[in-house]
Structure formats: structure tokens, C-alpha cells
């Protein structure tokens, strides 16, 4: 079982994360989330253990944030998969640089299927970054996976199992 023990949580939206496999697809075969690997973030989902029967859900009611450990930005781009609910600015991914929000991507497609999003981060090279996922909606949720880019973890990595010099961080095992 994977954990997000090095990430910082507020509220309860991320209590049952990460999610094992495409739990939404197990519930409804017509739903395809575009999950990469076995583990991802999906705040509607409630399957944080492979031993739990597939299809369980948390629902949209819990709210909260999930903030990554710090990393040093080394390249010019970061990209990731983002999807989920449609509640405007209340469901989003943020790039914090030196503690301040510098980039925002909204889960504004009203679809479970995650789509690739790209941030140009060249102006932040050699600065300290973090990813913050925000689910501030009681009627929507966030889906997030496959964070990639040129950065170096500081201290412990995202899931304690990833090589800290990796240029691709998944909510998954290597």
C-alpha cells in the first residue's frame, strides 16, 4: 500500500488517498480516468488499499488541500494529468514557488478523464517549489496523476520509494 505521508493535508478530502487503480472505471465501465500506473489522486474515490473491494467512493462532500514536499525546480516545464469536477476555481492544482502561488490549473472540464496540463516554469529555475492540490468544493472533486518535470526532491521524496533525482514523479511505485 502506498502513502502520502510526506505530503501535508488539511481537511478531509485527501484522507483516503492515494487511490488504487482506476476505481471509477470499476464502478462504471464507461468511465475512463486515464490513470497512469496503479496509484493516483481522486478525492471522490475511497480505495486506498488493494484489499478493499473496487468501486467504493468517498463522494464530493469532503474538502481540503494536499501539499507536496519541497523540490528544487531544474528545468523549464512541468506537466501532469488533471481532471474531476466542475466547480470553477474551487478545484485546482497549484504550483507554489518559495511559498507563493505562481501557477494554477483548474479541473474545469467536468470530466473524470484526466488531461495533460503543462506549466512553463523556466523563470523559477533553481527555486523551491511545491504542488498543492485544492478540493474546496462540496459538489466536485479533483483527479491528479503523473506529475513530470525536471526537478530534484529535497529530503524525502514524494512516496518514499522514488529516486530523488527522478525527472518523473508518479503517484505510483517505480
Image (spheres, rainbow, N blue to C red):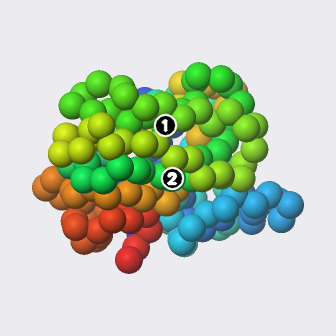
Q: Nearer the viewer, residue 100 or 30?
A: 100
Q: How many other residues sit within 10 Å of disc 2, few (<14), some (14-19) or many (≥20)?
A: many
Q: Is residue 163 visible in this depiction of the protein? A: yes
Image side of residue 29 versus residue 171, left or right: right
Residue 133 % position (x, y): 45, 38
Most extreme residue toward the left, as rendered? 155
Secondary structure type for disc 2: strand
Q: Tell me which residue sits at (22%, 58%) in the image.
A: 152
Residue 80 % position (x, y): 51, 53
Position of residue 93 relative to residue 156, above or below, is above
Most extreme residue toward the bottom, as rendered? 174
Position of residue 148 relative to residue 98, above or below, is below
The quarter of the displayed image where residue 23 is located = bottom right
Position of residue 167 relative to residue 129, above or below, is below
Q: Tell me which residue sits at (22%, 67%) in the image.
A: 165
Contact between labelled residues 2 and 1, with CB atoms less than 8 Å apart: yes
The quarter of the displayed image where residue 137 is located = top right
Residue 116 % position (x, y): 60, 53
Q: Quadrant of the N terminus?
A: bottom left
Q: How many other residues sit within 10 Å of disc 1, few (<14), some (14-19) or many (≥20)?
A: many
Secondary structure type for disc 1: strand
- Mark toward the start of the polypeptide (1 vs 2): 2
Q: Nearer the viewer, residue 10 or 76?
A: 76
Query: Can you tell which mark lies on residue 93?
Result: 1
Amino acid at each position: 500500500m502506498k502513502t502520502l505521508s510526506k505530503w501535508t493535508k488539511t481537511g478531509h478530502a485527501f484522507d483516503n488517498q492515494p487511490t488504487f487503480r482506476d476505481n471509477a472505471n470499476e464502478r462504471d465501465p464507461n468511465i475512463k480516468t486515464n490513470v497512469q500506473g496503479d496509484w493516483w489522486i481522486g478525492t471522490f474515490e475511497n480505495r486506498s488499499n488493494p484489499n478493499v473491494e473496487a468501486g467504493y467512493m468517498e463522494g464530493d462532500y469532503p474538502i481540503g488541500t494536499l501539499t507536496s514536499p519541497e523540490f528544487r525546480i531544474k528545468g523549464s516545464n512541468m506537466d501532469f494529468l488533471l481532471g474531476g469536477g466542475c466547480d470553477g476555481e474551487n478545484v485546482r492544482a497549484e504550483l507554489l514557488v518559495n511559498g507563493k502561488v505562481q501557477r494554477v490549473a483548474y479541473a474545469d472540464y467536468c470530466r473524470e478523464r484526466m488531461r495533460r496540463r503543462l506549466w512553463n516554469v523556466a523563470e523559477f529555475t533553481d527555486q523551491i517549489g511545491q504542488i498543492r492540490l485544492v478540493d474546496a468544493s462540496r459538489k466536485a472533486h479533483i483527479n491528479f496523476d503523473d506529475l513530470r518535470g525536471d526537478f530534484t526532491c529535497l529530503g524525502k521524496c514524494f512516496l518514499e520509494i522514488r529516486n530523488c533525482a527522478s525527472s518523473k514523479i508518479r503517484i505510483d511505485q517505480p
